[in-house]
Amino acid sequence: MMEMVVALAIFGILLLVLTSLEKQFVQLQLRSRANLMKHPETSAVLSRARKDILDSSGYPEKHLDFVQGPSVLLLSSKDAEGQPAVIVYDFRTGATARRITYSGEVVTSEWTARGVPRYRIEDFEMPDGGVAVRLQAFDFVKTKSGTEVERLVLDQITEPRAGG
Amino acid sequence: MKSSRGLTVVEVLVSLLILSFIVTTSLAIFFDRHDRLERAGQVVRAYQALANEAEVIRHVPFIELEPGESTTFQSGRAILYGFPDLETVVRIQETSIGLKEVLLTVRWNRGQRSAALTVLRTDTGGGQLW
């Protein structure tokens, strides 16, 4: 009888540990801004975009079917050989982020990140009159009541350094 | 003859004591980890806000950087949503002729937590360094 009581008590303690860990995990999911379990490539997109914006020399209004807007970022840049290039960040699908490099109308490289939060692009006017790119990422987070709310998880302001 | 005697009360009590010590220590570590993760997330967001404000400060004309203190982040504070007792400070000092130090600070949790970034600006005569 005693052995059974002790065994059940130990089992109960283990269950307590497991449930408290699970509770913590759920709380962490609720509180954390960028859900990196769901969006593993978030930082890859941000770092590439930051480098591309720093190296760019302007923002073309349009390139082929792409039009500059809240979900499409167009950057004038140069390729590895120093030839003019246009870099396109396409966030229109929501679930993916595409980076396409064009030399004229020819695609020279394409990279797609899957599992990303929803990105939004805004222009941000600097005090000296320059225009920076404000790249924001939004995640949908479940609240305790079960409803999904949109939450700002990343915010990055970058202005080109190339100086034309 | 093989002894069939069980454990004494003292042995059982000592075992339970050791077991409860291990369990309580493990739980304390896990709860502490939760708090640390939350604090780390806040620090990451605080530095995002600081980096954005530093980017803006780099583009303020040198002559317009008036020495003094203000609480406004021109880049906004949306990313700092949910910080308890949030306070932002921009302090500008002219440390020598042609050199200004801009200290950007984010404080929260009644000043118990903070993150700061210093931007040094020099008078380049109006042009940019890049």
Image (cartoon, helix red, strand yellow):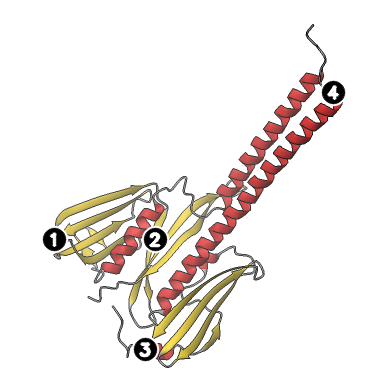
Q: Mark 3 or mark 2: which is in front?
A: 3
Q: Give amino acid for label 4.
A: Thr
Q: Mark 3 or mark 4: which is in front?
A: 4
**How much space separates mark 3 and mark 2, taking CA atoms?**
35 Å
Q: Which residue is mark 1?
A: A104
- Residue depicted at x 47% and y 83%: B101
> Where A153 sits versus B54, above or below?
above
Q: Are marks 2 and 4 in contact (CB under 8 Å)?
A: no
Q: Give amino acid for label 3.
A: Asp
Residue most extreme to the bottom: B97
In the picture provided, is B24 more to the left or to the right than A44? right
Figure quadrant of the N terminus of chain B: top right
Q: Position of residue A80 (x, y in %)?
A: 17, 61
Residues tagged by mark 3 and mark 4 found on one chain of the structure: yes
Q: Secondary structure at mark 3?
A: loop
Residues tagged by mark 1 and mark 4 found on one chain of the structure: no
Q: Mark 1 or mark 3: which is in front?
A: 3
Q: Position of residue B38 (x, y in %)?
A: 58, 55
Disc 2 residue crowd, few under 14, some 14–19, many 20+, Cα 10 Å: some
Chain identity of mark 4: B
Residues tagged by mark 1 and mark 2 found on one chain of the structure: yes
In the picture provided, is A97 more to the left or to the right than A141? left
Q: Mark 1 or mark 4: which is in front?
A: 4
> Where B59 sits versus B67, above or below?
above
Disc 3 residue crowd, few under 14, some 14–19, many 20+, Cα 10 Å: some
Specify the label residue B123 is tagged with.
3
Q: Position of residue A142 (x, y in %)?
A: 55, 48
**Between residues B128 and A116, which one lies in front from this camera angle?**
B128
Specify the label residue A120 is tagged with.
2
**How much space separates mark 1 and mark 3, taking CA atoms?**
40 Å
